[in-house]
Image (cartoon, grey):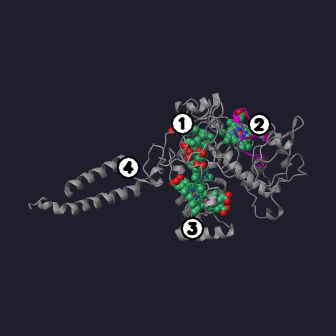
Amino acid sequence: MSNFFPRWANWVPLQLLVCVLLAGAPVTLGIWYYFTPKYTRVGYQPDQPVPFSHALHVKQLGMDCRYCHSFVEVAGHSNLPNTQTCINCHGEGKILGNSPRLAPVRESWKTGQPIPWVQIHRLPDYAYFNHAVHVNRGVSCYSCHGKINEMAQVYEAQSLSMKWCLDCHRSPENFLRPPSEVFNMDWHPASDTEQREMGLKFKADWKINPPVNCGGCHR
Amino acid sequence: MVRYFSIILTLLVVLIVSIAGLRGCKTKRPPIEIFPDMVRQDKVKSQVPSDFFADGRGNRQPVVGTVPLGYAAPSSSKMSSADGSDSVMGGAYNAVIFSGSEGYADTGKVGTNWGTGIPFPVTKETLERGHDRYEIQCAVCHGSTGTGNGIATKYGLVGVANLQQQRLRDMTDGEIYNTVANGKNTMLGYGGVIQVPDRWAIVAYVRALQRSQNATLNDVPDAERASFQPTNAPVTTPAPSKP
C-alpha cells in the first residue's frame, strides 16, 4: 500500500490546533475589550445644535450647576435648562446677542420650539434612576459625570453599566462627600484613607443604605 | 502555514483596533444597543419628544386648575396672610411649590397694591437658604453683594440693576418678589425655576444684603458690639432682616 498522505500531513492536526489557539486568544480578548459599555458608551460625545461649553460657563464664569439644571435636587430627572435661561444673558442686545453660534437659541425663543439637544447619558427604560436621592446624600455629579467643568463639549465619562452602579452601592463610602461639595467638581479628598473614614462616618450618620436587591433599580 | 496565519492575524487585529479605536476615546457614534428588546419602551420620560401629540413634545402643559403630580397644592402652603400668623412654611423646602393661588404669598400683592413683609417667620435657616439660592441664581448678574457687578457684566451684560440703590431699598417686598418671579424690563423672570418659599427666602436675603451694606453699630447685637473697633470697616455679616 503506497503512502496515501504525504509525510508532512502528520503535522497538520498540530498546526491547526496552534492556529485555533492563536486565533482564539485575540477573539476572546476582543470580545472582553469591546463588548462592554466601557467601550460602547464611554466617550460618546455628539455634536450639539449649539456649541455650549461647560468649561466656559461653569469654570470660567463660576456658574452653579443648579442655575441651569435647576431641579436636580428635588426631582428624579435632572432637567436641561429652558431657552429663557439662556436668553436672559444671550438675548438680543446682550452677551453675543447676534452671534451666529447662538442663532438656534434665538430661533427657539422666537418660535417657542425647544432647542433639540442631543441626549448623551441614557439608561435603558427598565432601570430606575433618581438624581435627587443621590445628590442630596452626598454623591457628587463628579462621581457619575466626570469633570464636567472642564468639558468644552460634554461626553459620557462613566459606563453607567449595572456593575458600575453596584460598585458604588456596595461600598458608597468611597464616594460620599460633604453636602457642600456635591456641586464642586474640583473638590478632592486629601487621601483615600481620609475619603474612607469620612465616607464611613457619613454612611453611619445619615443611615445610608443603597439598594443592591434587584427590585431597587428594576421596579 | 502557521507563519502566514500569524501575519494575517496580526494585520486583522491592527485593522480592527484602528477602526474601532480604544476604550474611552471620543466618538460621535451613538452607543450600540445589541439586544434592544426592553431597552426602549413605549413610555414617555421627561424632556423627550413624543409623536403621540401634535406638537411633538412628551412633556405637557398642566391643565388649568390642576396640580401636577409631586407638586404641593397652592392652598396647602398656607402662606396667605401677610403678617405670617398662620404660616406652616418654616423650613419645608422638600415639597415642590409653585404659585397658583391669588394670595399675597403667591403674587406679592394685597388687593391691587404691592404688599410688604415675608409671609412666614424669617429664621436663620430662611436667610441661609436665601443666601444659597441668591448665590446660585442672582450673583452671576447682580454680584455677591448686590451692587450689580456680577461676572456676566464683565462680558458685556449691561443695565444690571444695583440692588443697593435707594429706590430698591424703599421698594416693597411684594414688588421685589414679583421681579424674581416674573421679571422686570430686561430681566426675565425666574418663577419657572425658583419655588415660592425660595423666592421669599431670596427677598429676605436681599433685604439682609441691603442692610449689611449700610449697617451702623446699632445693628450689631449688644453682646458682639464690643468686638467692633470704631473704624469704617464695612460690616459684612448679614443682619437678620425684619420679617
**Residue A141 can be seen, yes or no:** no
Query: Which label number is shown at residue A50?
Result: 1
Classify mark 3: helix, strand or loop.
helix
Query: Which label number is shown at residue B21?
Result: 4
Classify mark 2: helix, strand or loop.
loop
Where is residue B17 shown, x and y percent of the image? 34, 50
- Span highlighted in magenta in the image: B177-198
- The residue indicated by pointer 2 is B63
Q: Tag 1: residue type?
A: Val
Q: Distance between the residues labelled 3 and 1?
A: 38 Å
- The residue indicated by pointer 3 is A195
Quadrant of res A27: bottom left
Q: Tag 4: residue type?
A: Gly
Of callouts 3 and 1, the N-terminal one = 1
Q: Tag 3: residue type?
A: Gln
Instruction: Pick the quarter of the image with the N terminus of chain A.
Output: bottom left
In the image shown, does A20 or A49 lie closer to the viewer?
A20
Subunit bearing disc 3: A
Subunit bearing disc 2: B
Q: Do the residues marked 4 and 1 share a common chain?
A: no
Residue A193 as seen in the image, left or right of residue A64: left
